[in-house]
Amino acid sequence: MLKVEVIKTTKEFQNLREEWNNLLSESKADTIFLTWEWLFTWWENYGMNRELTIFLIKEKEMLIGIAPLMICKEYVAGLPVRLLKFIGSEEVCSEYLDFITIKGITIFGMFY
């Protein structure tokens, strides 16, 4: 059975380094722009006024998926909205952003 955890604080994000990079190394999305170091540094420098919302997908306590996301408050047609975006998608942008999953599984409605 899959379990979803939501990371909402910088401290929780900080504690994911080893587990994050281990999963990334087994993923098709293995790129520098998805490393913990890249995204955590981006978050520390540009994350203000945004809400950290990282989803961890676990199966039997093993991490099998990460959705590195944040909530941004913006105005669309003069109305305030909350948008879910990848961490690193604004300011100094990363060139490649994606969900991080073990190869060959389906998470978030997509096959990896």
Image: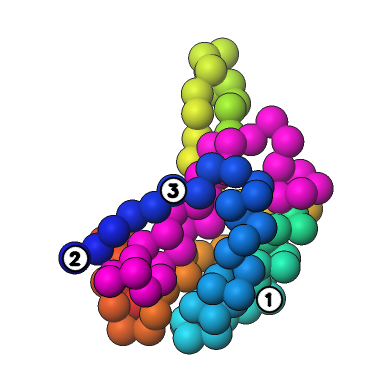
Q: Looking at the magenta stretch, what is its main secondary structure?
A: strand
| Residue indicated by mark 3 | 6
Q: Is residue 72 left or right of residue 47?
A: left
| Residue indicated by mark 1 | 32
The quadrant in which residue 1 appears is bottom left
- Please tell me which residue is depicted at 53% across the width and 56% down the height of the picture: 68
Question: What x and y, as percent, mark residue 73?
Answer: 58, 27
- Choose between 88 and 55: the one closer to the eye: 55
Crowding near the residue tagged with mark 2, few <14, some 14–19, many ≥20 C-alpha atoms within 10 Å: few
Q: Is residue 55 left or right of residue 25?
A: left
Image quarter of the C terminus: bottom left
Q: Magenta segment, which residues?
A: 43-71
- Please tell me which residue is depicted at 80% across the width and 48% down the height of the picture: 45
Circle 3 — which element?
strand
Mark 1 and mark 3: span between their CA atoms? 23 Å
**Color theme of the render:** rainbow
Mark 1 and mark 2: span between their CA atoms? 31 Å
Q: Amino acid at mark 2?
A: Met
Crowding near the residue tagged with mark 3, few <14, some 14–19, many ≥20 C-alpha atoms within 10 Å: some
